[in-house]
Amino acid sequence: MANVTFLQQVAPVDEYGRGLYAVARSVLRAMLDQLSSEDLGDLNVERDLVTLRQLSKVARIGRDKGLRGDGFEWAVHEAVLGGEPLVTGPISEVLRKASRYLEDSPPTSLLFGHERARYLGFLDAVIENAGEEAVLLPDGRGHPYAFGTWVAVAARGKPAERVLADRIKGVWKSDLFLSNQERVRYFAATVKSNHRQLEAGRGLRIGIVPEAKDLQRGVHRVENLWVVALPDPDGFMGLFNDGYNSVGRAICTLGKHEPPPYYAKPSAKAQRLQEQLEKYATAKVVDVVDALNEAAQQNLITSKHRLLSVDAPPWLRMVEKDTVVIAPRPSFEKLD
C-alpha cells in the first residue's frame, strides 16, 4: 500500500514568483508522469526515486512535442484547484454557457487522460473523488450518464469508442473533467497548447487553449466545443511560458542537452528559479516538487491522506549494492 497525499490549495496564487513555482511544479510533475516503463527500466529505479539529473538525462525538451502540452494540462488543472483567477474566471464563464443548471460557484477539476488511467489506483481515485452521485453531461438533451461507470470504460482509450454510448463516444479523449463546487455534474474537457490541435468529439464539451493570432482571448463556440482561450502573453499563458522555459533550460543544463533558442530565454525571476533548480541535481524529483509546492503555496493548503494499492512494476530488479547518494533537501527562496 502507498500513502498518497492529495493537496488542495485554499488561497489563490497571487504573486508572480509564487505563480512561477506553481507552474514549475506542474511541468516537473508532467515530465515525471511521462516517463515510460522503458525509461524507468533504463534508469533502473522506481518512479518516485528518480532524481532531477536522471530525469534530465532522458528528457528531450526540444523533441518531446507532447511534453509542453502535458505540462500545460497539469498547470491548468492545478490552477483551477488553486483558485487562480486568471484561469478560474474564464472557466466559470464557460461552465455557465455549457449548462444553465450549474450554480455560479468556483470551478473544480479532475485530472484524467486515459494514459494515466492505466496506472494502478489512478482511475479508482478519479471516480472516488467525483463521488457516487456524479454524472457526466453528454451532448444534446436527455439524461446524463453515471460518471464512474462510463469513465471506467473511457479509460480504455480509442478501443472504448465501440462500447461507449453514442452521445459520449469521444469522452475517452478527455484531459480534465470540470464541474463546480457542487461536484455532481461534470463536463469532459480537452486541453491543448495549440488551438489547431483541438479535436471535437461526442461528449467532449469544453476546450482549453492559449490565445492565438487567429483566436482571441475569451470564450468561443468552435464546432461542438465551448473553447476557453487563455490570455497570452499578459495572462496565465505568459506565466506558464516563463515557468516552462525556466524548467526547460534547467533540464538542458543538467542533462547536457543543447539549450533552447535565445528567444526562449526566461525572465529575470524565472532565471533565478532555473538557478535554484540546477542546485538540486541529485535530489529526487518528488522532493523537488514538494519543495516547489511549499514555495508556491506557503502553507496555504489542506491535505488529505489516502492509501492506494500499488504493485511492484515488472521492470523493477534488485541490484547487489546501491551507490549511496547524499542529496541536499530542496528549498526555494521567494522570488518576489
Image: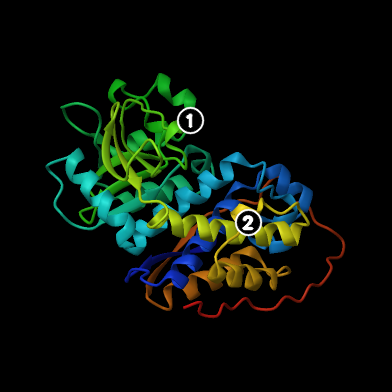
Above or below, 68 against 88 in this view is: above
- Name the foreground residue: 61 vs 139: 61
Above or below, 301 against 199 in this view is: below
Q: Which mark is residue 50?
A: none
Point out residue 97 in the picture as x, y percentages from the top left corner: 18, 41
Q: Earlier in the sequence, mark 2 or mark 1?
A: 1
Above or below, 8 against 179 in this view is: below
Point out residue 143 in the picture as x, y percentages from the top left corner: 17, 30
Amino acid carrying mark 1 in the image: Gly
The residue where tag 1 is placed is 157
Estimate the spatial distance between the alpha carbons at disc 2 and disc 1, rounded to whole Å: 29 Å
- Name the foreground residue: 179 vs 251: 251
Point out residue 107 in the picture as x, y percentages from the top left corner: 26, 54
Residue 318 picture quarter: bottom right
Q: Is residue 28 left or right of residue 106?
A: right
Residue 88 picture quarter: bottom left
- Name the foreground residue: 295 vs 17: 17
Above or below, 269 against 187 in this view is: below
Amino acid carrying mark 2 in the image: Gly
Q: Are marks 2 and 1 in contact (CB under 8 Å)?
A: no
Point out residue 290 in the picture as x, y percentages from the top left corner: 54, 70
The residue where tag 2 is placed is 248
Disc 2 is placed on an element classified as helix
Name the quarter where the N terminus is drawn.
Answer: bottom right
Residue occupying image coordinates x 57% and y 77%: 332
Disc 1 is placed on an element classified as loop
Q: Nearer the viewer, mark 2 or mark 1?
A: 2
Residue occupying image coordinates x 24% and y 44%: 94
